[in-house]
Image (cartoon, rainbow, N blue to C red):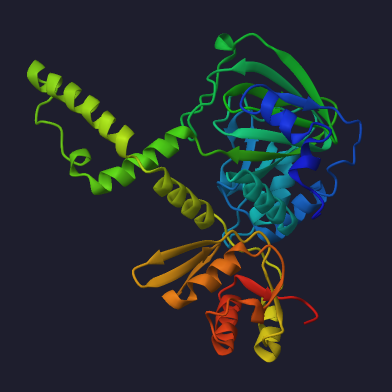
Amino acid sequence: MTAFSFDRIIAPCDPATFLDTYWETQPLHLARKDPGYYSALFSSAELESVLQYARPQPPDLRVVLEQVEMSAAKYVNADGSLNMNQLYKAYGEGHTLVVNSLQRFVPKLALLCRQLQELMNFSVEFNVYLTPANAHGLHPHYDTHDVFVLQIEGKKSWSLYGSAQQCPLLGTFQPVIPVSVLPPLEQVVELTAGDLLYLPRGHIHDAATSDAHSMHITIGVYPTQWVDVLSTALTNLALKDVRFRKALPVGYLNDGSSRHYVDQQLHALIKVFAENASAELVHEVLADQLIRKSSPLADGHFANMDAAAKTLGLKSRLVKRANMRCRVTAVDNDVRIQFPGNTIKAGAEYKEALLFVARAKQAFEVDALPDSLDPGRKIILAQRLIRGGLLQMVKGD
């Protein structure tokens, strides 16, 4: 599973070609004629286990037919378990079963999701759709995030109608589009097991099965847009400059002089913004947000902590846990290292050591921590970072 990567997901299209030609611009269809290409990712049997044992609840679980969602009361028991027989019945009657945020329930997908987030620096989410033969779950619509469709089992026919709006704002209204106002049909793509379809956000589409069932995973990418960067920069500036925080004149829409004043002030503040917005602060805020959205992956850390408590020494080798993006900041007389799931604070004398850890790409001995710390403090810091969830001892040490 660890061999699955973005490169493999879109192969034989290489990432540079994808970004230059398709990203945010036009659909990409890859017909591989290799039914098992994505089989290691997931299966309908694994979906059944997720439903039975992980018990996803609405809105993470949806049961849909022709855009109409079945009431959760029909398949969620009083104790929160799912009535599997009711879900089987719904599927047999043509309903599509959808599980959102699938990476929350499947460890191997959680790992791949984190890898994609680290590569792209965007939020990523996996959803799965199981549709019986001769069924239609959702009407024509578009998504406000980019979507990679990975056909896992069966086949499904996708109708593509072009863009309703190029690069719509994330999270804005996504209308179901009546057939009477649909743009002209651009192409029909049949996905069979092993195929991929990339749809830029804003691209209108719908999908249906014919003589076979279908199961596909969507990888939703929620990019940071330039409007987010500008909004972050404006908020940071407003925190320091009272002019951005003052109210508009009372009754500003009621007379011409007030409206003229608003126009003047708007242009003046735009100039102040252009001259004083801090790109450095924006980078810091975006880095903080990316880390806060992530959480550690399950990797046997309890056992590693037990081993470290018994054997940790200066010659012990440490490594950061998988996909642990770090950020070191100084606050007053303290220094802090932030990583998914935690922030650890220490005295200013630990700054070099924390920067060393944050920048480390490979395993290192405890004694390799900067000599600004004496041996005892090196061990104490290593113990804190292991207990806090950032570091692990290399197995066998």
Figure quadrant of residue 375: bottom right
Q: Is residue 335 above or below residue 101?
A: below
Q: Quadrant of the N terminus?
A: bottom right
Relative image position of residue 14 (x, y in whole percent): 78, 33
Q: Quadrant of the C terminus?
A: bottom right
Relative image position of residue 148 (x, y in whole percent): 70, 35
Query: Looking at the image, which is closer to me, 177 or 94?
Result: 177
Figure quadrant of residue 203: top right
Q: Residue at x 71, y 68 (%)?
A: 299
Q: Is residue 162 above or below residue 394?
A: above
Q: Residue at x 65, y 22 (%)?
A: 205
Query: Looking at the image, which is closer to me, 209 or 226?
Result: 226
Q: Residue furthest front?
A: 371
Confirm whether residue 255 shows in the render. no
Relative image position of residue 171 (x, y in whole percent): 48, 35
Confirm whether residue 104 shows in the render. yes
